[in-house]
Amino acid sequence: MTSALSFQNSNTNSSGISFQGVSSGIQTSQLVQAEISQASLPLQQLQAQQTANNSRSTALTSLEGLMTSLSSSINTLNSSGLTARSVASSDATNTYVTATASGGASGSYTLQVQNTATAAEIAPTLDTSGDPTNLSTLTASSPVFTDNSPDQSGSVTFALSDTNGNVRQFTLPGGNNNINGLANAINALQTADPGIPGSKGLNVQATVVNTGNKTKGANPYELILTSTSTGSGTAGNNISIAELTSGTPTNTIGIAAGTISGSTLTGGTTSAAQPGVDAKFTLDGVQLTRSSNSVSDAVNGVTFNLLQGDQAGTTTLTVTPDASTASIDLQAVVSSYNTLIQTYGTDSAQGGALAGDFTSRSLIDQITQALTGPAAGLSSSSVYNSAASLGLSTNKDGTLSLDTTKFQNAFTADPTAAKNVFTTSGISTNASVSLAVAGPSTATGNFGFDITSYTSGGSLAGTITAPDGTKYDLTGSNGILVGSSGTPLAGLYLSVTGTGTGTLTLSKGVGQAAVDTITNLTAGTTGTIAKVLTNITNQNTDLATQITNQQAMLNRMQTSLENKYSAMESLLSQLQAAGQSLNSLG
């Protein structure tokens, strides 16, 4: 903390009346201040250094925030902008099917929807007037079973099964003897019972619906049970609820009796009238069935949303690279980078907080080199191998400009190649081995591999040859081989589905290189900026101690000088008095 230079008042004594220079005629306070001012030069230098450190710390912290923003915009570009795809439909009203797409999926797909997936449901049976004959009550508090016990301590036990064949029992006590109490007890079964080994939650949702007033005497509160997932399930397409209580009390809302044998529920009230049904549709003439109306596993990178069945014709969906979205996200990167460069330019100018600061200059240079240099691992003969090849150019002031037309043309022509300029990519000659993850320290180039053993879900082993020719024997499990730290393979994760040999060509795009650089510069307490800021804090702590000591020394010096001048005035006063006495004798 900067300490202000201060002086004690030497013009007055404790009564506040000035006596300075009374005997000598000398302005002693001015003499004291002149000497203190000369002696305070080291203190002023310490305070100036502390102020400069504070300004530098503020400027570096600001740059750190801008670097983080740049990293975030690059991540958005890499994860969504460069994988963006647009979908055009031959159905202007989007009646039967729509789609979303991302990644490498491009092309035209023709679909016809026979029926959509539905969820199994148990609902009240209605009479000819449309009023419920079961699973309903007159009021929300009406009982759902007859309890003749004096203290209302009776209970009824039910069993519920879902479309996956999971069965759970539950007891409804007298204290919850109403339709909402029953619904709450059913919904609680969605969570597995920790007290029962192997217990599973049921995919059944209970809802109480107040249908309002109907014909005289009708029950407006209806209980509806619905499967939380569409489709026929793995053990039939029905859900069932049954009362297991023998004797009394028994339920009064028409839930049929049933029994449990092993893990099977027999009898009860079922969803036979409204079973769960799988979706059926054709994709490019191939008949497909799915349990969900959201189909993301038919075409890589494309999610089809089935909306309505009984389609007489077909719908053609055409997926193309979304160059507009990609260029918007790339422009956001350019804007973030330019803000960083312009802020640094202001701070590093003459008189700025970072003028002549080599560390900050190095930080900016590292990010610039990463983002504007060639993509590591991509061939120099590739049409697209740098940001410049996609339309980025550097201006005289160090900022970037984007030629949107050039970028969109390149992205439309070869979206994968454009993406590889910015992201990490791995191309394998053997489908059994693919890139899962590459870390900041992973080398780029050609990695030879020889997977010698593989067990699905178990262990695997093989030899990986790094780009420098060094061979590493690796073992793994669950289909993943992990590179050893301290080697060119550090941070490398390979996904393995079988044995075989081949080559994985790994490249790191300029966007990922910039993100990795920024991570190293801004990381927690270990990043370059954090270390510099810690050093500044330590310097300021030491400066604060020196400033305190210097101020104390100046205060002591001022007191000493004032005492000396005061003694001098006193002595002169005495001498003057003595002289006047002698004169009076003459």
Image (cartoon, rainbow, N blue to C red):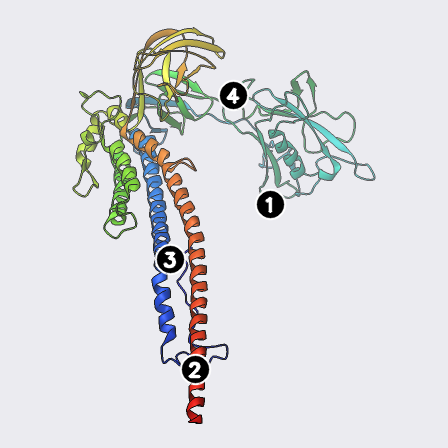
Which circle's residue, 3 or 1, is located before the other in the chain?
A: 3
Q: Is residue 85 visible?
A: no
How far apart marks 4 and 1 lie (CA) works out to: 35 Å
Give the CA separation, mark 2 to mark 3.
Answer: 40 Å
Disc 1 and disc 2: Cα gap in Å? 118 Å
Residue on which the image places disc 1 = 213
Q: Which residue is mark 2?
A: 575
Left or right: where 551 falls relative to 45: right
In x, y percent, where is residue 480? 43, 16
Q: What residue lies at 35% left-to-right and 42% top-to-bottom?
A: 64
Number of other residues with Cα within 10 Å of mark 2, as a class: few under 14, some 14 to 19, many 20 or more: few
Instruction: Assess disc 3: are there few (<14), some (14-19) or many (≥20) residues with their C-alpha within 10 Å of its C-alpha.
Output: many
Q: Which comes before the other along the chain, label 4 or label 1?
A: 1
Of the residues tagged 4 and 3, which is closer to the observer? 3
Q: Quadrant of the N terminus?
A: bottom left
Residue 232 tag number? 4
Label 4 to label 3: alpha-carbon separation:
83 Å
Considering only order in the chain, which callout, 4 or 2, is on the residue closer to the N terminus? Answer: 4
Q: Is the C-beta separation of discs 1 and 2 under 8 Å?
A: no
In this view, the residue in front, 524 or 142, is 524
Q: Which residue is mark 3?
A: 43
Nearer the observer: mark 2 or 4; the answer is 2
Vertical order, 465 against 525 (above or below): above
Q: Are marks 4 and 1 in contact (CB under 8 Å)?
A: no
Q: Residue at x 68, y 26 (%)?
A: 195
Residue 424 in sight in this render: yes
Location of residue 238 with respect to 26 vertically, above or below: above
Query: Is disc 2 in contact with disc 3, using a CB cutoff of under 8 Å?
Result: no
Image quadrant in which you'd find residue 248: top right
Dot placed on the residue nearer the N-terminal end, 1 or 2: 1
Badge 2 marks a residue whose secondary structure is: helix
